Image (cartoon, coloured by chain):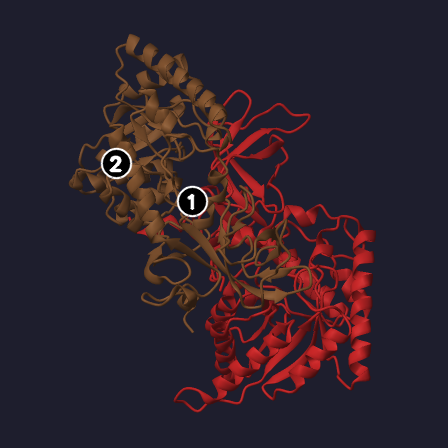
Chain colours: A brown, B red
Amino acid sequence: MSPLSASLSALIGQPVQNIDTPALVVDLDAMNRNLGRMAEFAKKHGLRWRPHAKLHKSVQLAKLQIAAGAVGICVQKTAEAEIMVAGGINNIYISNQVIAPGKLARVAALTQAVAPLSGQIAIAVDSIEGVSRLAQAMTEARTGGARNKTATVIDVFVEIDVGQGRCGVAPGEEAVALALEIRKHPALRFAGLQAYHGKAQHLRGVQERDEAIAEAVDAVLLTRHLMEAQGIKVALVTGTGTGTLVLEAASGVYGELQAGSFMFMDADYAQNERHPAQPKFEHALFVKTQVISTHADHAVCDAGHKSHAIDSGLPLVYAFDNQSVLDYFNGGDEHGILRPAAGSTRLPKLGDLLWLIPGHCDPTVNLHNVMIGVTDGLRHGTVQSIIRVDGRGAMT
Amino acid sequence: MSPLSASLSALIGQPVQNIDTPALVVDLDAMNRNLGRMAEFAKKHGLRWRPHAKLHKSVQLAKLQIAAGAVGICVQKTAEAEIMVAGGINNIYISNQVIAPGKLARVAALTQAVAPLSGQIAIAVDSIEGVSRLAQAMTEARTGGARNKTATVIDVFVEIDVGQGRCGVAPGEEAVALALEIRKHPALRFAGLQAYHGKAQHLRGVQERDEAIAEAVDAVLLTRHLMEAQGIKVALVTGTGTGTLVLEAASGVYGELQAGSFMFMDADYAQNERHPAQPKFEHALFVKTQVISTHADHAVCDAGHKSHAIDSGLPLVYAFDNQSVLDYFNGGDEHGILRPAAGSTRLPKLGDLLWLIPGHCDPTVNLHNVMIGVTDGLRHGTVQSIIRVDGRGAMT
């Protein structure tokens, strides 16, 4: 009767059939193939690969990525970085702006925490105010408290807006001014440019994505040129996601790939026209669900939008060879409505088990306490691991 | 450096200003006023009130509701019921279909767990198969295991579809057949009808909602008439939500109100034309967020759709008297884009703190580990309590 029982919908060694629903299930074989393809891709292009752990928020999977060749991980939140450091990861890039002095003190504390392990923390900035607040926090971390502190340095990337229209300064002079500001502070090390084009990831056509990344590359080149004219070396340009990684990799400008979603591949990314040079990534993340109510024209399953994110569209119903082809409609927080897809008339039966491919992996994982890792397929496989979503709800 | 630090964005006794962002904040004064108004409303109409705890998933708030006059709580999931029973709540209605034998065994175990406390578990059904599986689980719970078990009985509501088009049998003969089936099993007690009209909650106009609930009432009356003709007493009709509660209350047919959202009031419900007889419910749930990046035409805050649900629309930016009027646009998982609303040109400054009213409370709460309870307002108030979202992610 422990509340924890609610989280344990599967036991290691059991058949996949026994996993209680709804549950987030990782096809470990597919995931490992994706991981191998990405590691090979990065190696072939001689690029650093620092995948974004905002996808999985899991120490276990971060370690798996590092074992596969990643140089470290990216996170989006200070709290995510804390959880990863607590889990033993010590090369972490917070690829986002942090402004609150209390949070910056925590970032600075992280540089102290990883220093004995020769670890390195990095962060993005897009304002002079952000730089000076960060510098102040770093100085205070060196001098504050009773213990003797290490004179740690934080890597600082200047974020430029390469077309996303969200964070980042304009490419060019504004970025140069920020780099110069960073260099004034001994505890900050100008590490290069953050040049991530979020919108480009989801442009469907190869040519559209190509054009978007070509503009991003121009923006990076302009900025780098101006910086070098001032004697500022741009050691690294970091960015890219699963949608465009082949384009940044081919650019000769980007030195680090942040792509993470390829590991699970969601329904949204699968809708992109695949670039011929992009490794073939397979769906590896599923929501297992059960039919709990049947009707003449529809069936109802037990997975609604408390089980999967809907920001990038509703999930797709995975169709095994001999299964009905079904469309999923929103049935609210805890229900999904299933209807026969075009060309089909068959509906599932009461108690049938179905597998949904989430529209968007990152916020779907964040809804779950654990992922159930299975091997040998979704039908006849076995539960091999329970993967904790350590950073679930870590949002500060 | 404990991962837990990530969850604690506030300390009791601190000013509201100090709450780290993003954070889910409850205005306890507004919440308690809402609670008082609802309790008074139910009392005035002589109705049972069993609020849906899927909203808050919190043992602490469930106890507060019961102290205010609720007879117990509703939940949507077996795992939620387990957490509530573990927390000391013993009158729980799982207002949903449960089909998996493993889950039904857990439901039956809950009837055993609350029996020494004179507690009562209830559940909804909408199929003959569901009834017989439930009966089997109840029988096994009585006889299985080493200990001497109590001969517990579970209350069973027949769910009829009163216009939602999701779960529930058709009103009339099909419902009668289910009630008859329930009566065959000594461990099941036919408790009445589940007649919840989810879609009607969000119809904007009073008249539209009135018409929808009038149809629901007709469906209930038809079904009750047919049942009574067979000598089946319909002891209770349960349903309603925040959008229509005055209509069901006035019907003379419904005996129990399940409304829960009124306690927090989200942006979606606030868009409904208020029925003159509906108590005035105030917004009591907010996402506190900070501006982390500023630009000529927009600002960026640190709350995206990992901080609030977007299934019922994006959040509104709460405008204090002297604050800019802002529109919120989706900026992805961890960012919100803010632009001046029509008629305004002012943008917030870097570091400014803003308050968002979520589009939909239930799935927003499910994204957070805790809610921060504050008194004396959002500007100058004080943190009074940390409210655990005990059932967060409890979805089986």
**Relative to B390, is B227 on the left or the right?**
right
Q: Residue at x 53, y 89 (%)?
A: B151
Q: Residue at x 69, y 53 (%)?
A: B281
- Is A144 placed above or below B211 here? above
Determine which residue is flagged by label 2. A141
Q: Residue at x 36, y 40 (%)?
A: A78
Which image quadrant is residue A115 in?
Answer: top left
| Residue sticking out furthest to the bottom | B148
**Relative to A30, is A309 on the left or the right?**
right
Callout 1: SS: loop
User: Which amino acid, by three-letter code, is at mark 1?
Assistant: Met
Residue A395, numbered circle: 1
Chain where mark 2 sits = A
The Cα atoms of the two marked residues, 2 and 1, are separated by 23 Å
User: Which amino acid, by three-letter code, is at mark 2?
Assistant: Ala
Mark 2, residues whose alpha carbon is within 10 Å: few (<14), some, or many (≥20)?
A: many
Which quadrant: the N terminus of chain A? bottom left
**Relative to B384, is B92 on the left or the right?**
right
- Is A36 placed above or below A245 here? below
Relative image position of residue B392 (x, y in whole percent): 47, 58
